[in-house]
């Protein structure tokens, strides 16, 4: 149970880091392709992290 809580905090910290990383780009012009790319990569990272955690929980 403690391991699950630890993984949740790690994921939360990573999500916060990606949010902080993509926040300045989001404040730029909305038409810039770099903003979309950063947001897309951040979303991909979050989804893959969630998938990894869920698969770990299901396998254990």
Image (tube, helix red, strand yellow):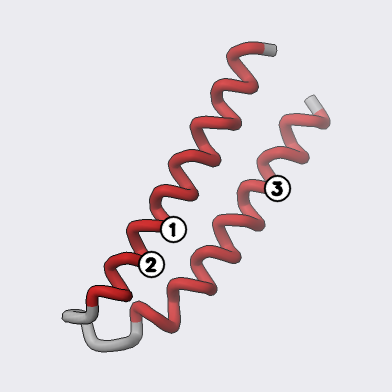
For the point 66% across and 41% down, the residue is: 8
For the point 56% across and 21% down, the residue is: 55
Q: Quadrant of residue 26?
A: bottom left
Q: Which quarter of the rendered picture does the C terminus lie within?
A: top right
In-image side of 21 versus 11 (left or right) = left
Q: Mark 2 and mark 1: span between their CA atoms? A: 6 Å
Q: Position of residue 18 (x, y in %)?
A: 53, 64
Q: Which residue is mark 3?
A: 9
Q: Which mark is residue 42?
A: 1
Q: Mark 2 and mark 3: span between their CA atoms? A: 23 Å
Local secondary structure at mark 2? helix
Q: Position of residue 44 (x, y in %)?
A: 41, 48
Residue placed furthest toward the bottom: 28
Residue placed furthest toward the right: 2
The answer to whether mark 2 and mark 1 are in CB contact below 8 A is: yes
Q: Position of residue 19 (x, y in %)?
A: 49, 67
In-image side of 17 versus 51 (left or right) = right
Q: Which mark is residue 38?
A: 2
Q: Quadrant of residue 58?
A: top right
């Amino acid at each position: 149970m403690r391991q699950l809580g630890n993984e949740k905090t790690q994921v939360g910290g990573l999500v916060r880091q990606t949010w902080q990383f993509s926040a300045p780009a989001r404040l730029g012009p909305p038409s810039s392709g770099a903003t979309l790319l950063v947001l897309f990569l951040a979303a991909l990272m979050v989804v893959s992290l969630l998938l990894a955690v869920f698969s770990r929980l299901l396998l254990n």
